[in-house]
């Protein structure tokens, strides 16, 4: 594995997950298999998330939408934090979550909005000023 992919992985992980206090998937994987955790991390963070075909905020909003529709709330929580870290506003994240009601249903949207609110409360960004 090239040194550049390792550096890309570290740089992208720092960009997305700086200050995240929840358990990161890498830490979970590593507790079971450190070599596979490294491979997953190099691919997911160092290759997929490090791609520059679309901006990081767009990539995170897409991720938030997919995780909302799939009702993957733990992973959604992590990526809401990442979206905020790369510059997405709470309003943009909420709008993406509202958009998913059409495809994932209102219960999935409500659960995602509660997750967003929880993250914003922890970050001292709740209640929203512009509502």
Image (spheres, rainbow, N blue to C red):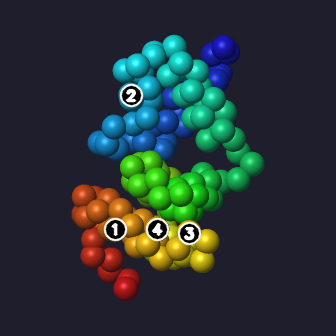
Tell me what residue is drawn at x 61 percent, y 41 percent.
49
Tell me where residue 10 appears, x and y as whole percent: 51, 29
Rate crowding at label 2 as few (under 14), some (14 to 19) or many (20 or more) other CA atoms within 10 Å. Answer: few
Q: Which residue is mark 2?
A: 27
Which quadrant holds residue 26? top left
Q: CA distance from mark 4 to mark 3?
A: 6 Å
Front: mark 3 or 2: 3
Task: Assess whether mark 2 and mark 1 are in contact (beta carbons under 8 angstroms).
Answer: no
Label 1 element class: helix
Question: For the view shown, which residue lies furthest in the bottom direction?
Answer: 131
Query: Which of disc 2 and disc 1 is earlier in sequence?
Result: 2
Residue nearest the observer in this picture, 62 or 111: 111
Front: mark 2 or 4: 4
Figure quadrant of the C terminus? bottom left
Res. 104 mark: 3
Task: Assess whether mark 4 and mark 2 are in contact (beta carbons under 8 angstroms).
Answer: no
Res. 114 mark: 1
Query: Which of disc 4 and disc 2 is earlier in sequence?
Result: 2
Task: Assess whether mark 3 and mark 4 are in contact (beta carbons under 8 angstroms).
Answer: yes
């Amino acid at each position: 594995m090239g040194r550049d992919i390792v550096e890309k992985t570290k740089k992208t992980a720092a960009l997305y997950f700086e200050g995240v206090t929840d358990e990161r998937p890498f830490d979970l994987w590593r507790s079971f298999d450190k070599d596979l955790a490294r491979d997953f991390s190099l691919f997911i963070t160092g290759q997929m998330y490090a791609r520059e075909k679309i901006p990081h905020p767009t990539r995170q909003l897409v991720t938030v939408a997919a995780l909302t529709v799939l009702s993957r709330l733990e992973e959604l929580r992590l990526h809401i934090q990442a979206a905020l870290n790369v510059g997405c506003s709470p309003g943009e994240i909420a709008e993406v979550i509202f958009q998913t009601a059409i495809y994932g249903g209102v219960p999935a949207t409500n659960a995602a909005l509660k997750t967003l609110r929880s993250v914003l409360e922890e970050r001292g960004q709740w209640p929203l000023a512009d509502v």
